[in-house]
Image (spheres, rainbow, N blue to C red):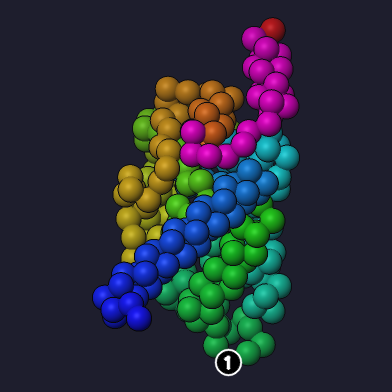
Amino acid sequence: MRCSAERLIEAIIATEVMAMQQHAAAEKQKQRQRTSVYVVTVSRDFGSLGKEVAQLLADTLEVRCCDRFILQEVARRAHVDETLVSALDEHARKITGHWWQHLLHKPTFTYEEYYNHLVKTVLSISRTGGVILGRGANFILGEEKAFRVRITGSEKECARRISEREQITLKESIKRVHDINSERADYIKMLYQADIRDDSSYDLILDSDRHDRIQMVEMILDAMQQAGYAIPATARNSLHTLSEEGRK
């Protein structure tokens, strides 16, 4: 009869082998998910081309760009009007003010409820894939469930774009850029107790002062591939074609 020490060693070894097998299986499953489902979150400064990059990336990967869809889904889950959710979207002061309660057909609608429906919506999108614009989705999903991108830009350059797009003075657009960026930062701080500008919350940060939208999408694809995502050749070909057309 073997001594108890030998049995203990065998049991420890068996436990370690099982743990290694489970870890390997989990890694294989994670890799399969990364090669079959694309989930990218895009945080952006106002006027930094973040929305344009998100849409082009979604088109390139052939997934949905989730922007207004998030508002529609939160409204559906909460049984409230979409215009109400739109008014609250990424606006911390409006959420904390609870000014909208008199518009509803129920006693209360707290920001906790808003957050709860937002989380469920983002998690639902992550199961089928998509490019999720804003709303702090990177804080909901984390690095395990999404590739997290942030698009930045100088206040001056972002304001110039807004001025041209909305036909307002540069002074007015600078104020809009400052106010909206501050509002978004407050929103992230309130919902997630996090800093929107914390570099550790993103896998890739791009400066729109230095790169156009096609270049930024190309860099995102490169970084995703390095992170283990399988990027189809057709995606790069479509970007190359678009880039060539832009030079003509």
Q: Residue 237: horizontal and vertical position, in percent? A: 70, 21
Q: Quadrant of residue 191?
A: bottom left
Q: Quadrant of residue 186?
A: bottom left
Q: Please name the residue shown 65% across and 59% down the image.
A: 127
Vertical arrangement, residue 220 with respect to residue 212, above or below: below
Residue 232 in sight: yes
Q: Assign the C terminus to one quadrant of the image.
A: top right
Vertical arrangement, residue 85 with respect to residue 69, above or below: below
Crowding around mark 1 (Cα neighbors within 10 Å: few <14, some 14 to 19, many 20+) is few
Could you tell whether 15 is left or right of 90 in the image? left
Q: Nearer the viewer, residue 38 or 96?
A: 38
Q: Residue 109: horizontal and vertical position, in percent? A: 55, 83
Which amino acid, by three-letter code, is at mark 1?
Answer: Pro
Q: Where does label 1 land, which residue?
A: 107
Question: Looking at the image, how many numbered discs can be counted on the residues?
Answer: 1
Residue 132 in sight: no
* Residue stretch rendered in magenta on the structure: 226-247
Vertical arrangement, residue 162 with respect to residue 196, above or below: above
